[in-house]
Amino acid sequence: TKQRLRPESQAHHHMSSMTLPRGTIPIAAASAAGLVLAKYLHDRHGSGGSSGRLAEPIPIQELPFEVLQALHKAAAEHPSKQEPADGCTAAVTVAYAFAETIFIFPITPTTPLGETADQWAVAGKTNSFGVVPKVQQMQSEAGAVAGVHGTLVTGALSTTFTASQGLLLMIPNMYKIAGELLPCVFHVAARAVAGQALAIFGDHSDIMAVRQTGFALLSSHSVQESFDLALASHIATLLCSVPFVHFFDGMRTSHEIQKCHALNDKQVKVVMDLLEDKIDEFRAQALNPSHPTLRGTAQSPDIYFQNVEAANPVIAK
């Protein structure tokens, strides 16, 4: 005998056996198809660039021959040694070499960068300019980034280290630094932004919160990359005047010890010598009573957005 279904079971059985009318597309599939079609039509008939895309791809430029020659010579004369290091040590090695001032405030998992820089300064370790950087702990991350901004405006190379809510406190000054095209690098051991609770999980929610500031983002996925891309970010910011956030996973890459080809001071000094013209150009634009310039004005909308767009060629580099 057939078992009689209850009314609600009959309704459920009826709905589960229903089929969509022929030609009907589920809403999700229709939305996805619409986005793909819109992208195709935009690429084919859009107004941006000769190919119709939003922008032409940035061409990859080879390094000048004399630069490649100098780098190969430095690698041959001052070879790297393999030694154990963690991500924090890798990043601060490069940051310290390029910095004349370093403003710090401790926050997990970036604290080792500031501690190491402070210890080196106390011990009298010099940077690639032959001077001991000024390392100063501030009252908060907001003060640290303000110190960086102030010294950059006066023509001194500066850096800072932070993570999580600390990076969020730096956002107002990050807009100013990027808007004024001041070259610098923030080194960040990425960490979850505290919501319902504090966490030291190494996600990238703090990095995602600063994408709109105008800083370029460069991510290292290993300790070796923390050496290499820290150096690349300091080179790139001087070449294009766009500030960088160099970041890596907190509590993993930041504290993970790996055997790496560590950069040595002589190799970094060769790079610094190659960037001498760019460093001089940066210093020439600093605030100076001998050639005063107007900064920090209030502009009406028409002038303001012209100045915003004036930075596009620099960013396109």
Image (cartoon, helix red, strand yellow):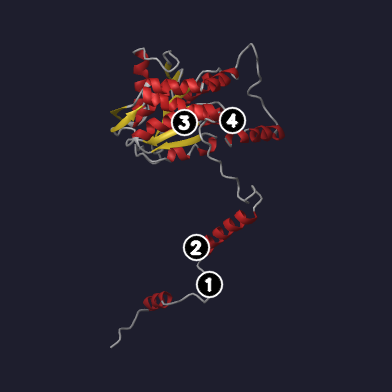
Q: Amino acid at mark 4?
A: Gly
- Quarter of the figure with residue 114: top left
Q: Residue at x 44, y 27 (%)?
A: 71
| Residue occupying the point 67% across, 35% down | 305
What residue lies at 36% left-to-right and 39% top-to-bottom?
202
Which mark's residue is nearer the viewer, 3 or 4?
Answer: 3
Where's the C terminus, which quadrant? top right
The residue identified by callout 4 is 179
Q: Residues within 10 Å of mark 4 (few under 14, many from 20)?
A: some
- Residue 70, position as x, y percentages in the image: 45, 25
In the rendered view, does 181 fall on the left or right side of 159? right
Depth order, front residue of 265/192? 265
Q: Disc 3 marks which amino acid?
A: Ser
Between the residue at mark 3 and the residue at mark 4, the CA separation in whole angstroms equals 18 Å
Determine whether 147 is above or below 245 in the image: above
x, y percent for residue 185 = 47, 28
Residue that carries the numbered disc 1 in the rendered image: 24
Q: Secondary structure at mark 3?
A: helix
For discs 3 and 1, the disc positioned in front in the rendered view? 3
Sooner in the amino-acid sequence: mark 2 or mark 4 = 2
Q: Could you tell me how far apart the alpha carbons at marks 3 and 2 are, in whole angstroms?
A: 41 Å
Q: Which residue is mark 3?
A: 233
Mark 1 is surrounded, within 10 Å at the Cα level, by few (under 14), some (14 to 19) or many (20 or more) other residues, namely few
Q: Reading the chain from its start, which is encountered first: label 3 or label 1?
A: 1
Residue at label 2? 28
Amino acid on which the number 1 mark rests in the picture: Thr
Q: Nearer the viewer, residue 166 or 289?
A: 289
Question: Tags 3 and 1 in contact by the CB under 8 Å rule?
Answer: no
